Amino acid sequence: MYFGSDNSSPAHPSILNALIAANDGYTSGYGNEEAMNNVTKKLRDLFEAPNASVYLVTTGTAANSLALATLTKPWETIFCHRHSHIEEDECGAPEFYTNGAKLTLVDGKNAKICPKNLLDAINLYSQKEVHNIQNGSLSITNVTEFGTIYSLDEMKTLTDIAKAHNLKTHLDGARFANAMIALDCTPAELTWKSGIDVVSFGATKNGCLGVEAVVFFNPEMAWEFELRRKRGGHLLSKHRMLSAQMQGYLKDDLWIGLARKANSECQKLFSKIEKNPNIKIIHPPEANLIFATIPTKLHDKLISNGARYNHWSSQMSPLDVPENETKIRLACSWCTTELEINKLLELFNY
């Protein structure tokens, strides 16, 4: 009964088989292998962006931080939600890789940036004197840290504000496939057609061993990213192991099927717990994450009987929760089974 994180799910067998096949014989390294050429072509086709520059790294933190460092100078700021992953869960990596760029935190309900709040935050730095921080970039997370999803119109509203103030735009797509499935849209619609300059295209949470793609829709930014990736220690010599994963992930639309399964299992679980009087749903799930509060006694019983999920605390503030209740996050993944769901439901009703 593991609902702790989609990061903790195993790698899909097709990904492991792709790695085994890639391990045969010799090939060029550092991204010069044929498999990487195939990945680049496939992602360009998927994103309807024939001139896009495509790169692979091992982690989402590296993808986000190196991309933002390419977009943002040290004396500029990155506008992001107060509860974005780059703010709460990356140990200052964006500030480190940008050599000190500031994160300006913007509020909005359920971890979604409010357009008015974004405009107000931008206007705080309207004075472009040497004494002031300069506007740099906007980072949007979709799926958000609270499991909510920006609609395409909501994304376009934010990026239009950004473009009007000369901000470059980044999409943290750690759960990109889950958002795309939920919105029933194309990769292009979720990115450059919505005003995004660069996307961190996540795969690790959706069945890969450890690989993320960074896709620049403006190839003029590409060379700087290559230098930053190398200087930051994220250019692998045995790069084929990244290319093989991504190639296996994209083959026959495996990535879409895995995300669809995760979202579907989440909806199954939600449909069976939403009417349980012991469970208070914070907001209906839109992808593969459920946020709720439960009695602390029930939480203790669940844990003692083998249920695993995230015990959410500071990230859920300012939500007021009584002392006798506990905030939890349930994450479904590509390998969540109906058996696991039914066992968890038995405990909830125990």
Image: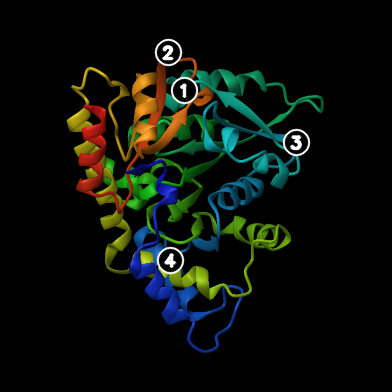
Q: Is residue 339 above or below residue 317?
A: below
Distance from label 1 to label 2 (Cα)?
10 Å
Tell me the amino acid under the disc marked 3. Trp
Whether residue 41 is visible, yes or no, is: no
Number of numbered callouts drawn: 4
Q: Which residue is mark 1?
A: 316
Residue receiving disc 4? 246
Q: Quadrant of residue 234?
A: bottom right
Q: Is residue 99 above or below residue 210?
A: above
Dot 3: what SS? loop
Q: CA distance from mark 4 to mark 3?
A: 35 Å
Q: Earlier in the sequence, mark 4 or mark 1?
A: 4
Mark 2, other Cα within 10 Å: few <14 / some 14–19 / many ≥20: some
| N-terminal-most mark, 4 or 3 | 3
Give SS at disc 1: helix
The three-letter code of the residue at mark 2 reads Val
Amino acid type at mark 1 = Met
Q: Are marks 1 and 2 in contact (CB under 8 Å)?
A: yes
Q: Which mark is residue 75?
A: 3
Which circle, 2 or 4, is nearer the viewer?
Answer: 2
Dot 4 lies on which element? helix
Up the image or down, 296 lies above or below 338; here it is above
Q: Residues within 10 Å of mark 1 (few under 14, many from 20)?
A: some
**Farthest right residue in view:** 130
For the rendered model, the colour scheme is rainbow
**What residue is disc 2 on?**
321
Q: Nearer the viewer, residue 303 or 123?
A: 303
Under circle 2, the secondary element is loop
